[in-house]
Amino acid sequence: MRSAEAAAPVALSELMERAGQSLAEAALRFAGPVPALLLCGPGNNGGDGFVAARYLHQREVEVRVAALGEAQTDLARAARAAWGGAIEPIEDAAPAPLVIDCLFGTGLKRGLEDAVSERLSGLVKSAQWAVAADLPSGVEADSGGLLSQVPAFDLTVSFGALKPAHRLMPAMARMGRVVLADIGITADGPWFEIGEPALPPVAPDAHKYSRGLVHCLTGEMPGAMALAASAAARSGAGYVRVSTSAPIAGLPRSVVQVGDAPLADPRIGCLLVGPGLGKLPQLLTLALTSHRPKVIDAEAIGHVGDPARLKGQDAVITPHSGEFATLFGELPGSKAEQALAAAAASGAVVVYKGADTLVAAPDGRLGFAPPAPAWLATAGTGDVLAGMIAALRARGMPAFEAACAGVWLHGRAAERAGPYMIADDLLEWL
Ligand SMILES: NC(=O)C1=CN([C@@H]2O[C@H](COP(=O)(O)OP(=O)(O)OC[C@H]3O[C@@H](n4cnc5c(N)ncnc54)[C@H](O)[C@@H]3O)[C@@H](O)[C@H]2O)[C@@H](O)CC1
Ligand SMILES: Nc1ncnc2c1ncn2[C@@H]1O[C@H](COP(=O)(O)OP(=O)(O)O)[C@@H](O)[C@H]1O
Ligand SMILES: [K+]
């Protein structure tokens, strides 16, 4: 965002004008024309606040402004001067129905002083509506960490592009609804929010193998593979085959159950190993002898041992935080940095799951999942995701794109399935 700002074809003051106007507009639409208190910090986040105050005043909203110290940048000084109205010290500011936090944004370097963060929390808690400009003050933009106490906001208005913290825990849980204002510049780069996927169409001359064969290796708990294989079948694979020594209940009749099948079969579009695997590391070893693309999930991730074993495997791995730590140990940095380091160390596409799922590629691409419902936190939903990604991979999508598409579709299916869904229900919504 900083380099996009520097390269912007318009003056920075114009960007601030647009940011402040967008903030005012979004707050007004969200809360209505209720009396507003803007809290303005010393940098450009504060500058956005002075601009927003001016626009709210023009729109005949009752506005007060409280500042934390003097403006420290030329842009913020100009915005403060253009406001022209009264400015209270933040220590004395009385509560208001609408509080707009413009204390700090991407420039935050350390936690807020205790007195300031307590004041902010008090004003936010007594407000009917709390809106944050760009980021709630106290949030670290790049990591999603909280550098000081951060109250819960109802709305966060970001500018130009989302920052990592908008999609990383714990910060994202404090932001309420997040909206992105177009200020006329965009930040392109290898980090992005995962959007609705373009799925490969079914060719008019398709046959079941050309649409993609998913081959599943079952372990000790066949129920998990029943979920994963069903999800693969419902995600457009032409053929789903499960190799198992005993019949598995609950699979659609279209899913074929076989004893052994050669894993070198070139028709296999994607192998799936892990869901319900249990203590059968030999099945992972078997999968790694196949040169076919593969999705490695659940217990199989724990059996990998050395991440370098996955080099050259054309693999997608789908760890939750426990499985991630088992395979990669405690890596330094933010979740984003850890996911990328894991992808580089393993050569695999890493789907680092959780409330803030990330998809990392060894080449440095990093997809941030849009927020998914917390009711996905129920046993078996990860198995469904693994089956979905395997089907998309077998359908010919490259590993990274298949993983991103699977994550996006999984979240949207959960939205449709609704609260108290179980993993089985998710299958109906794929
Ligand atoms: N993304 C964009 O294109 C645009 C960004 N703008 C705004 O500019 C913001 C970034 O502005 P700045 O870089 O000036 O940064 P901030 O306004 O976030 O704050 C930086 C200032 O606060 C000081 N500071 C940092 N942590 C502190 C702490 N804990 N206690 C006391 N002082 C502290 C710094 O030394 C610096 O003076 C964005 O978040 C956004 O709101 C908009 O004005 C215009 C367009
Ligand atoms: N709080 C949450 N909010 C959104 N998604 C979540 C949350 N908790 C878990 N998930 C998602 O639910 C799935 C759980 O997968 P996993 O932990 O492997 O469960 P299981 O092994 O039982 O299938 C993952 O896709 C994860 O991203
Ligand atoms: K802020």
Image (spheres, rainbow, N blue to C red):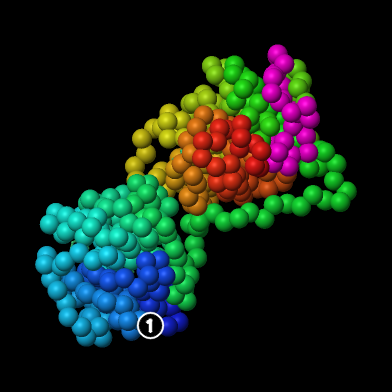
Which SS class for mark 1?
A: helix
Within the image, what quadrant is residue 166 found in?
Answer: bottom left
Residue type at mark 1?
Glu
Characterize the magenta stretch by its predominant secondary structure.
loop
Residue under the point 69% across and 41% down: 235
Front-most of residues 133 and 241: 133
Quarter of the view holding residue 114: bottom left
- Nearer the observer, 329 or 217: 217
Say which residue label 1 marks. 14
Q: Quadrant where the N terminus lies? A: bottom left
In the picture, the quarter occupied by the C terminus is top right
Q: Position of residue 351 (x, y in %)?
A: 52, 41
Examine the structure image and report whether residue 249 is included in the region drawn in magenta: yes
Check residue 245 for magenta coloring.
yes
> Does the rendering let one see residue 192?
yes
Residue at 50% x, 50% y is 369
Beta carbon of the mark 1 residue lies under 8 A of ligand 1: no
In the image, ligand 1 is in what quadrant? bottom left
Instruction: Give the extent of the magenta segment.
Output: 232-255
Nearer to the camera, 377 or 351? 377
**Residue at 65% across, 36% down:** 427
> Residue 96 in the image: x percent, y percent?
23, 66
Going by the picture, which residue comes out furthest to the top?
A: 246
Above or below — where is 380 with respect to 147?
above
In the depicted structure, whether residue 379 falls above or below residue 335: above
Closer to the camera in the image, 394 or 83: 83
Relative placement, left or right, of 370 versus 329 is right
